[in-house]
Image (cartoon, helix red, strand yellow):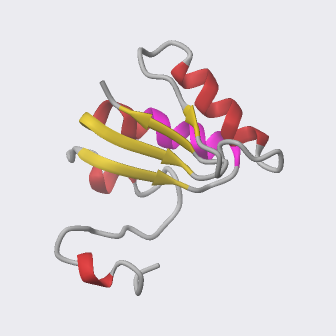
Amino acid sequence: MEKNLAKFQKQICLYKGWIPERFKDVSELQFRFVHIDVDLFQPTKDAIEFFYPRMVKGGVIVCDDYGFDTCPGATKAMDEFFDSKVESVIHLTTGTGLVIKH
């Protein structure tokens, strides 16, 4: 991934580690783009609960595994979280879930 993003290295920071252990390192930041690719319910839920309130208006959350039968936990976490929000998850034909913060 780092090689693919090398040309953007001045605009991004990569934080390697486990969810939610690394959240404390970025808790004061706001985000424009968050890509979640963790497959399972609990880390997806933890990520959404952490990042959503820190997203700027118009920010984008992508859940890589949202629509895959092999990752029902990711789908459940996203659907449950956004059930009570003004935003809804857009299910793309690629299986990805997309949310744009209002």
Q: Residue furthest left?
A: 10
Report x, y in % for residue 82: 52, 22
In the image: residue 7, left or right of residue 69: left
Residue 91's image quarter? top right
Report x, y in % for residue 10: 17, 75
**Location of the C terminus (image quadrant):** top left
Query: Which residue is at the front of the view, 36 or 25?
Result: 36
46 inside magenta stretch = yes
Give the residues in magenta: 40-49
29 inside magenta stretch = no
- Decide whether the magenta segment is chiefly helix, strand or loop: helix
Report x, y in % for residue 51: 38, 40
The residue sitting at 70% across, 42% down in the picture is 67
> As displayed, is residue 54 above or below residue 37?
above
The residue sitting at 50% across, 23% down in the picture is 88
Residue 55's image quarter? top left
Q: Which residue lies furthest to the bottom in this view?
A: 3
The residue sitting at 62% across, 22% down in the picture is 80
